[in-house]
Image (tube, rainbow, N blue to C red):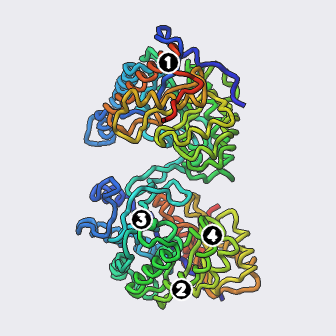
Amino acid sequence: MTERVATTTGLLPLPDPAKEELSDLKGHQKGDLISGTESEEIASAYAEYRREVIDDQQAAGLDRITEGQLRWDDMLAHPLTTHENVDPNGIVRYYDNNNFYRDPQVRGDLDFSGDVAEELETASETIDDPAASLQAVLPGPYSLFDLATDEHYGDDAEFFGAIADFLAGEVEAFPAHKTLTLHEPSLVENPPNEDLVERLADAVDTVASETDSDVVVHTYFGALDETTYAHLMDADVEALGFDLVAGDREDTLSNITEFGTKDAAALGIADGQNTLVESADTLNERVEWFEDQIPVQEFDRLYLSTNTEPFYLPVNKHLAKLEAIAAAAGNVDQEVTA
Amino acid sequence: MSRPADNRAQFRPEDHPNDSFLLTTVVGSYPKPKWLNRADDLVDDPDSKFSEENLKEAHDDAARVITHEHERCGLDTVVDGEVRRNEMVEYFAERIDGYEFNGPVKVWGHNYFDKPSVSAEVAYDEPWLVDEFEFTNNVASKPVKVPITGPYTLGNWAFNEAYDTEEELVYELADLVNIEIERLVDAGAQYIQIDEPALATTPDDHAIVGEALDRIVSGIDEDVRIGLHVCYGDYSRIYPELNDYPVDEVDLELCNGNYEQIDVFSEPEFVPDLALGVVDVHTAEVEPVDEIKENIKQGLKIVPPERLTISPDCGVKLLPRDVAYGKMENMVEATRQVEAELDSGEIDLEEPVPTAD
């Protein structure tokens, strides 16, 4: 029997009142964004909204709860843009979206920061039974490498390794958590070159080995190419995550058919970039479609979520999607509407 | 193919001082007077007596002021600064059936966009810009240009819930833009600019923009000048494809990149008229006349003077108002000086930009 786990990818939209309140508290310029040393007033505002989005996830019936990553002004680049040896400089485009983040220019050693661990500590105080339900979220080592600019290490392989070591150090400091999700959209958008792809599994293992929790490497914005997929399969993690909303999902299936997959999988079944709210029935059909296409394997566990981070969505549609995902996992009943 | 039209002569002022004529214009937006922003806030304040009617009057006043400000700069064609428009997608989405708003989404940091959703088939309801045009046309002594957000941007910058593909949505929106242009032309408009900033970020969709433009200009008299504005991006990815667009003029943001991309357009020959950005909208310093003259000469490398239009790089709404004015004023002065130098033969069209020694 396959366990269905309703969850999110993290990086949730900021509640609407928070958008204005925090903007007013912090200022509107790029220098006013989160640096990791915000004032007590700003920190307490975030704490309040963190509680709100945790409540939202618990109320929706999710099995895993993230702290929301509301402070992540720079989306996946956040763990670097808050690092003291990183200069968050120009505004650059976030993948193929109409979103932008501050380019993290790494100018010194990527030693321990503790920023994300601190967020998780405060979340743990709010979440019911964090050891059984807290889901930590980080960029995967390749995506963080891809989103950053190296002004210090001078060599791609060394920089990639330093990023993996940095993330590993952060994970080591995390409080008890059930799941760790590593976001790896860059594996799709800008796949690693020949040299880096050889180092991919090791880099993931460097991070994953620092936790006893279940590690999910989630990919989105489309399917991985065969080479990247084959190398990612070498990583010692519980599950790989797939974008089942993207038009090229057949390519994902052929990767799995060709190279196999882990005993568990994460399925991006709801569109994190479109306000159309899929019914629980539709989401369930997507899960079943996936299972039917992989007849040789019965999964131990399937994590269900949006394909991408949901911060692209307005809050009302995001919340509606959470409910549908929880229903598709069988956690709550959802009245089916035509 | 571009439209076989020569419709620029109608914008040449009767008292134009030079034989040569480089049409001067603006992309559209202009800094709003500060009191107008206050008025916009007041009408939403339940404790204020400021009414919608008062706001309309404020908009009229602002449109009159900015139109006249454009005229004082000496521009050959003017816009009201888009002072009635809140944002370039929202304004239209509020007027098109099929769009709904669900709340703001993040762009970067604490900058948000009230990104609308197309939740049902789009349809033409109320006119979008006819009232705006008629008002501006009445107060202007110069021809009025009407910027319209293009269907590709109206589709690409919204959530598409209702159509199987974004392309399908874009074509439906293009048909609505065509209806709006017909109404504008009936009201007397002779100069329309389609704004497609989204093409700059997704240049691979240039064929969709082309097909949409075919629909936009369908049945529109060739005497009506149709321009296309595309913001800064990697222009090599839309050139030479844009030569096939059925427009009279393409307006490009090249000053911002210090004309590094100008050579993209030298081969093959540029087919539509070129509207060249000659002042940077991202710097708050007013460029001196001599500097702008050199920028204008970059355009003469691509098209002859009779096919060159002069404009700022993009809308100037984010600049301080006095800086915006200064840039327009210097832009017109530089244009008139270049025209005079063309007349006198001082500028050699075979070698319009002297090479550095």
Q: Chain of mark 1?
A: B
Give the amino acid type for the residue marked by disc 4 in the picture: Asp
Q: Which numbered disc, 3 or 2, marks the residue that appears first in the sequence? A: 3
Depth check, mark 4 against mark 1: the one in front is 1
Q: CA distance from mark 4 to mark 1?
A: 62 Å
**Depth order, front residue of A57/B248:** B248
The residue carrying mark 2 is A205
Q: Which numbered disc, 2 or 4, marks the residue that appears first in the sequence? A: 2
**How busy is the neighbourhood of tag 1: few (under 14 within 10 Å), some, or many (20 plus)?**
few
Give the amino acid type for the residue marked by disc 3 in the picture: Pro
The residue carrying mark 3 is A104
Depth check, mark 2 against mark 4: the one in front is 2
In the rendered image, residue A39, in percent from the top left (x then y), is placed at 24, 67
Badges 2 and 1: C-beta atoms under 8 Å apart?
no
The label shown at residue A243 is 4
Depth check, mark 3 against mark 4: the one in front is 3
Q: Residue at x 40, y 21 (%)?
A: B333
Q: Residue at x 41, y 31 (%)?
A: B291
Q: Is residue B128 visible?
A: no
Q: Residue furthest toward the bottom?
A: A212
Q: CA distance from mark 2 to mark 1?
A: 69 Å
